[in-house]
Amino acid sequence: MPSDTHISCWAIQSVDFPSVGSLSERLQFLLRYAILAPSSHNTEPWRFRVQDSRIDVLIDFSRWLKVADDDQRELHISVGCALENLLVAAEHFGLRHDIVLLPKADDPSLAVTVTFSEQIQSATHRPPVLFDMIPVRHTNHQRYEDRAIPDEVLQQLQGICVEDGIKLHLTADPEIKRQVDDLVVQGDAIEFADPAFREELAYWIGQGVFGTGWLMSKIGKLAVSYIDMGKSQATKDSDILMSSPILGLLSSEQDDRQSQLRVGQVYQRLSLLAASHGIWCQPMSQIVQVPELKAEVAALNPESGFIPQHPFRMGYAQAEKHHTPRRPVDEVLV
Ligand SMILES: Cc1cc2nc3c(=O)[nH]c(=O)nc-3n(C[C@H](O)[C@H](O)[C@H](O)COP(=O)(O)O)c2cc1C
């Protein structure tokens, strides 16, 4: 169950960085930023190993959503998000990083090795404001305001996607919105009709991952386990989707693990930059979790031949009142 330490992770202060400490102490501090990344169902499917000047980012397969994410797409995207927070923080504290994605063909749990050195590095696709937004960003589940995102902001957001083989598509097209809405409604109905899906969701709610109090977690768990919530979820999802000024899709040329890690990196940078403009994001994974719906998403994607990886909506709204909990660094350190 989440305790105060699981929420106080968000109160991180950059002045606490051990600037005169050893490199390994400084690297451990960077992990306090990495763990604030988003992950599907807030499963936090990562672990970290600090060795000399290197951090190994590991995938914790015991936290994989076997039902909702049977192809491990979201597992890898989530770890990519944590990696990006790590790199943003490293650049802020004046550390250069060199990364190798999936360095060992025979070890799928070793997602990334990052080697650090004492050298200034500031990539143009990581403007300094991203760092300040790490403890501010959150997934915003509310209706978004009826307010367009200005073109110059959309261009800035578009410019954040520089990874080879990854495309970011942002659209305000009402017809696309209507079609995606239709897919979301179908996705909710299909998934909530599946007892295994509900059971898995109920398990994670019961773990308190969404930050509700202990009692609320238990009640939520019971409700999701025993009631088919597809219809009410679909009505809610449809309402919030139609309120969104922009829908986004990250897609990739290859449908491989490297691409999914990179998609996570782009999504994280994008949501940090968006937050600096008061714009929030919410992924809509149901439409890529169901194979037949994923095929329809692919048909809507103007990047023909690219595989849909991560659909989401964006817009202005009041910030959520609470952050979701996180396991502190010592719980995820190998
Ligand atoms: C790969 C991925 C898929 C996600 N899918 C959904 C989704 O379908 N619906 C949703 O509301 N949130 C989704 N989320 C957001 C997570 O629920 C959220 O990141 C997590 O609960 C932590 O909360 P935070 O982002 O506010 O810190 C997803 C996040 C990631 C990284």
Image (cartoon, rainbow, N blue to C red):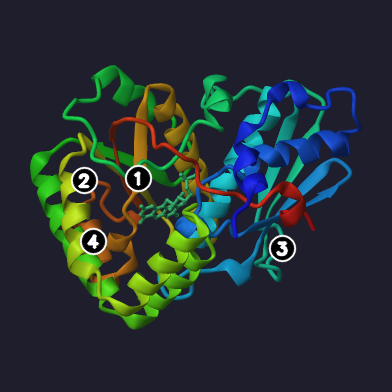
Please give the name of the residue rendered at 16% of the width and 48% of the height, measured from the top-left corner: 239
Residue 102: percent from left, percent from top: 65, 58
Q: CA distance from mark 1 to mark 4?
A: 15 Å
Q: Secondary structure at mark 1?
A: strand
Q: Is mark 4 within 8 Å of ligand 1?
A: no
Q: Which picture quadrant has residue 193?
A: bottom left
Residue 69 at least partly seen: no
Q: Report the amino acid beneath label 1.
A: Gln
Please give the name of the residue rendered at 21% of the width and 30% of the height, measured from the top-left corner: 145
Mark closest to the chain's N terminus, 1 or 4: 4
Q: CA distance from mark 2 to mark 1?
A: 10 Å
Residue 191 at least partly seen: yes
The answer to whether residue 25 is left or right of residue 6 is: right
Q: CA distance from mark 3 to mark 2?
A: 42 Å
Task: Please name whichever residue, 264 or 42, is drawn nearer the observer in this view of the structure.
Answer: 42
Task: Please name whichever residue, 135 or 284, is drawn nearer the observer in this view of the structure.
Answer: 135
Compared to residue 322, the image places residue 205 above or below, namely below
Residue at far bottom of view:
195
Callouts 1 and 4 close, C-beta under 8 Å: no
Q: Report the amino acid beneath label 3.
A: Lys
Q: Is mark 1 within 8 Å of ligand 1?
A: yes
Q: Which residue is mark 3?
A: 104
Q: Is mark 2 within 8 Å of ligand 1?
A: no
Mark closest to the chain's N terminus, 3 or 4: 3
Q: Which mark is residue 59?
A: none
Q: Which residue is mark 1?
A: 282
Choose mark 3 or mark 2, whichever is in front: 2
Callouts 2 and 1 close, C-beta under 8 Å: yes
Q: Which residue is mark 4?
A: 233
Choose mark 2 or mark 1, whichever is in front: 2
